[in-house]
Image (tube, rainbow, N blue to C red):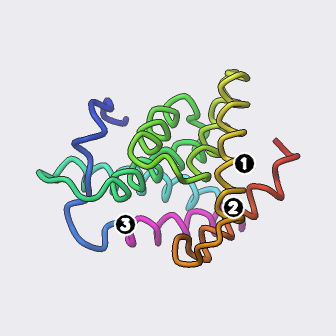
């Protein structure tokens, strides 16, 4: 079971490359889900949550807000994919409190809210994800956003009607 979320400010990764390791594991989870390998899917999501939590708990110092938000997002995403929407909400909210400008954080929080019946909050978060996505795609500064940021923003906007 997940430890109780005490304060976002104490969360950070203890080793360089931890975000990359968690992202690799997340990618395996997504691939397993797409191939409908349920055993690997369940095992890997649980492993991802455990791995990220261990690194966060062991860290006595803080990294950047983006690292902290990425960690919170990964845990929230793993919980959401494991059909634990209520638990995922605090992690997505923690991610957003550290790095507000990521539309994917708001989109996943909207889905978690929707799953637990919080329609008003879901609509608000969904709208925020759309606004942030449009800002990314309309930005004139090519150095401000990565291709990944643009891809995520495009995907969110393409799927807006499916919410």
Residue 155 in the image, given as x and y percentages of width and height:
75, 62
Secondary structure state at the residue bearing disc 2? helix
Of the image marks 1 and 2, the number of the one nearer the N terminus: 1
> Along the line of sight, which residue is nearer the eye, 109 or 55?
109
Q: Kindly identify the residue that appears in the image at 56 percent across and 75 percent down.
A: 146
Magenta region: 20-36
Q: Kindly identify the residue that appears in the image at 60 percent across and 67 percent down.
A: 149
* Count of numbered marks: 3
Of the image marks 3 and 1, the number of the one nearer the N terminus: 3
Residue 28 in the image, given as x and y percentages of width and height:
55, 69
Q: Which residue is mark 2?
A: 153
Q: Vertical placement of 70 versus 22: above or below?
A: above
Q: For residue 19, which numbered disc appears in the image? A: 3
Q: Vertical placement of 57 versus 120: above or below?
A: below
Which label sits in the foreground, 2 or 3? Answer: 2
Q: Is residue 33 magenta?
A: yes
Q: Quadrant of residue 138?
A: bottom right
Between the C-alphas of marks 2 and 3, the distance is: 21 Å
Q: Which residue is mark 1?
A: 130
Report whether 102 appears left or right of 97.
Answer: right
Secondary structure state at the residue bearing disc 1? helix
Residue 79 in the image, given as x and y percentages of width and height:
52, 43
Between the C-alphas of marks 1 and 2, the distance is: 8 Å
Give the residue furthest to the front. Answer: 140
Give the residue furthest to the right. Answer: 161
């Amino acid at each position: 079971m997940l430890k109780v979320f005490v304060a976002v400010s104490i969360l950070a990764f203890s080793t360089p490359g931890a975000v990359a390791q968690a992202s690799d594991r997340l990618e395996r989870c997504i691939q397993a889900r797409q191939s409908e390998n349920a055993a690997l899917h369940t095992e890997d999501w649980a492993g991802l949550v455990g791995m990220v939590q261990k690194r966060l708990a062991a860290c006595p110092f803080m990294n950047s807000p983006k690292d902290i938000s990425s960690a919170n997002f990964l845990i929230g995403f793993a919980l959401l994919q494991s059909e634990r929407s209520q638990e995922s909400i605090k992690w997505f909210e923690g991610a957003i409190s550290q790095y507000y400008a990521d539309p994917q954080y708001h989109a996943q929080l909207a889905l978690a809210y929707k799953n637990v019946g919080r329609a008003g909050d879901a609509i608000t978060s969904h709208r925020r994800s759309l606004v942030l996505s449009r800002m990314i795609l309309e930005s004139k500064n090519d150095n401000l956003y990565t291709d990944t940021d643009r891809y995520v923003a495009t995907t969110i906007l393409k799927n807006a009607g499916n919410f």
